[in-house]
Amino acid sequence: MKGIVDILRLVVSIMICQGAGLIGSIFTRTSVGTWYVTLRKPSFNPPSWLFGPVWITLYAMMGVSLFFVWRKGLGNPGVRVALTVFAIQLVLNVLWSVAFFGLNSPLRGFIVIVVLWSAILLTVIYFWRVSTAGALLLLPYMAWVSFALVLNFRIWRLN
């Protein structure tokens, strides 16, 4: 029975994270081919085709990370705190898409991504206390958001 519960938790964890990505993509899709293409971008701006595969992979890794912590049990106060912080950063992740793409505002996006980066750092710290593997799986996400923060800043300053 524990194996089935773990499989369900893993699937739900991945679906939650991919769902956040799907919600964020609603705001991205509406302006990535219109408003975004008119912006001046720095030389290190990746090609547009790269963002989709990177985010899908990162959301999958976030889901597995979430599973590793959740499987430790909601009766554990450390797990509850870690999951709460994770939920906050996931909401901030979606809000970045709303701010940057939905509102067509690199400045608002930059403000949100700074808060998001801080929330990811807290998530890694709290996850580390519960599951080292869960925390390590978040490091590529943190690295990508660090890059996105710099990119967002440069786009804001260039426009």
Image (cartoon, rainbow, N blue to C red):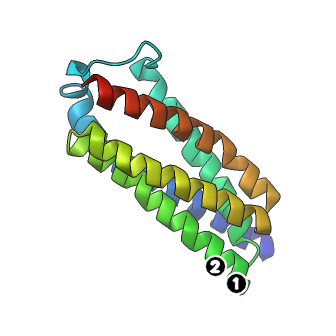
**Residue plotted at (28% across, 46% down):** 108
What residue lies at 28% left-to-right and 41% top-to-bottom? 107
The kind of residue tagged 2 is Arg
Q: Residue furthest front?
A: 157
Q: Nearer the viewer, residue 28 or 106?
A: 106
Does the residue at mark 1 contact the one at mark 2 (Cβ under 8 Å)? yes
Is residue 11 among the parts visible in the rendering? no
Q: Which residue is mark 1?
A: 77
| Residue 80 - label | 2
At x 29% / y 37%, what residue is drawn? 106
Disc 1 element: helix
Crowding around mark 2 (Cα neighbors within 10 Å: few <14, some 14 to 19, many 20+) is: some
Q: Circle 2 sits in a helix, a strand or a loop, which is it?
A: helix
Q: Quadrant of residue 28?
A: top left
User: In the displayed structure, would residue 30 be above or below residue 16?
Assistant: above
**Quarter location, residue 77:** bottom right
Tell me: residue 134, above or below residue 28: below
Residue 58 vs 67, above or below: the answer is above
Q: Nearer the viewer, residue 13 or 75?
A: 75
Q: Is residue 159 left or right of residue 65?
A: left
Q: Looking at the image, which residue sits at the far bottom?
A: 75
Drawn side of residue 49 relative to residue 136, left or right: left
